[in-house]
Image (cartoon, rainbow, N blue to C red):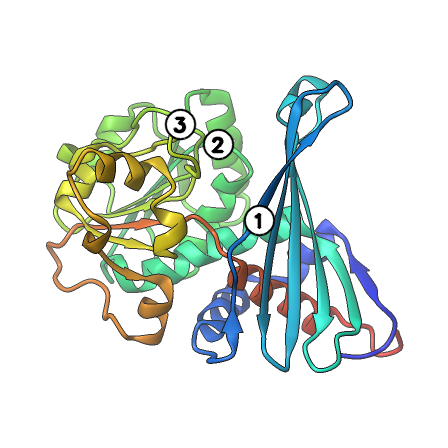
Amino acid sequence: MAGNPQFFSPQQVSELLPWPELISAIEQILHVEGAHAPERTVHTVPDANGNDAALLMKPGWVAGDVIAIKAVTFFPDNGALDLPTINAGVLLFSGANGTLLGACDGNELTTRRTAAASAVAAKRLARADAKRLLVVGTGALSPMTALAHCAVRDYDIVDVWGRDNDKALRVSNSLVAENIPARVADDLDAAVTEADVITCVTGATSPLVKGALLKDGAHVDLIGSFTPEMRESDDDVVRRAAVFADTRSDGIIAGDLAQPIAAGIITVDDIVADLAELATGAHKGRTSDDQITMFKSAGFALEDVAAAKLVFTAGRDPGA
């Protein structure tokens, strides 16, 4: 990878990150000894009206290969302006000599790598014969998680539930257009009882998925929560499930783990393994067909590094 820096648009990022290759790239980077992701940094930044916005920076690298940094802005008042509240970009540098390779849109990259990371976990945690997937939420991640999960399991039914039925129908229709057997679920509790895999991509601050309703052998994938106040699952989920996280340090910040830990229901030691331990085989994942499993995704920088490297490797203009 050498030459003049290039920029990849959201559309290009989407085209350059097909699910099988992206899932494989994330799995592979977790095997690399020189791969490292230091702690992210967050800064409060006043917006034009004097309100608090935020700047988040997440670096990561593979020694001697590539260095990436994702910068993310969070402007909570943007919704009223019909603008996205979260915007991101990724810079990629050579790990051999530090030269700038280029930049790419970070929103599309983040959405796709987040969904792909959950699929990496589901390959090891969902039953091999899982046939029914439930997607809880109707935002940008909703169709992405369905597509990523369908890349690692063959589902007969993909239910989509949301508080807004019209939005759920739009997600369902977009999946049908991708040859996914999707439909709208009107009753969340009923859909939970029937699901083999449940993936949650919401901004909920009170639990949506009830652990008492989970069937034996179910896998629960929790993506949406990233603060202690946000929560998609209740205490019964962590009571019944073997708990996994992409990283322990970030996973315990989210309410799905932070709140039951604070209440003494579980401890950090109850997190069985992280994504690297699953991907490398240090932990074998699911141990029986009846076991209920839970994966808490918080997102970490090595996923961004893997995705960004794949974009630049696949899309690099040899003449640039």
Q: Position of residue 150 (x, y in %)?
A: 41, 55
- Name the residue: 17% across, 44% down: 266
Q: Amino acid at mark 1?
A: Thr
Q: Earlier in the sequence, mark 3 or mark 1?
A: 1
What is the quadrant of the N terminus in the image?
Answer: bottom right
Tell me, yes or no, whether the two marked residues, 2 and 3, touch with CB atoms within 8 Å.
Answer: no
Residue 58 shows in this picture:
yes
Instruction: Judge left or right: residue 103 versus residue 304.
Output: right
Task: From the image, state whether disc 3 or disc 1 is nearer to you.
Answer: 1
Q: Residues within 10 Å of mark 3 (few under 14, many from 20)?
A: some
- Above or below for 295 versus 20: above
Q: Position of residue 75 (x, y in %)?
A: 66, 29
**Mark 2 or mark 3, whichever is nearer to me:** 3
**Residue sitting nearer the eye, 300 or 21:** 300
Rendered position, 102 above or below 299: below
- Residue type at tag 2: Thr
Whichever of labels 2 and 1 marks the residue nearer the N terminus, that label is 1
In the image, is residue 28 above or below residue 179? below
Badge 1 element:
strand
Please indicate whether residue 286 sits to the left or right of residue 206 in the image: left
Circle 2 residue: 138
Q: Considering depth in this image, is 225 or 108 the residue closer to the camera?
A: 225
Q: Using the image, tell me which numbered label, if any, was put on residue 41.
A: 1
Say few, some or many: other residues with alpha carbon within 10 Å of mark 1 (under 14 / 14 to 19 / 20 or more).
few
Q: Which label lies toward us, 2 or 1? A: 1
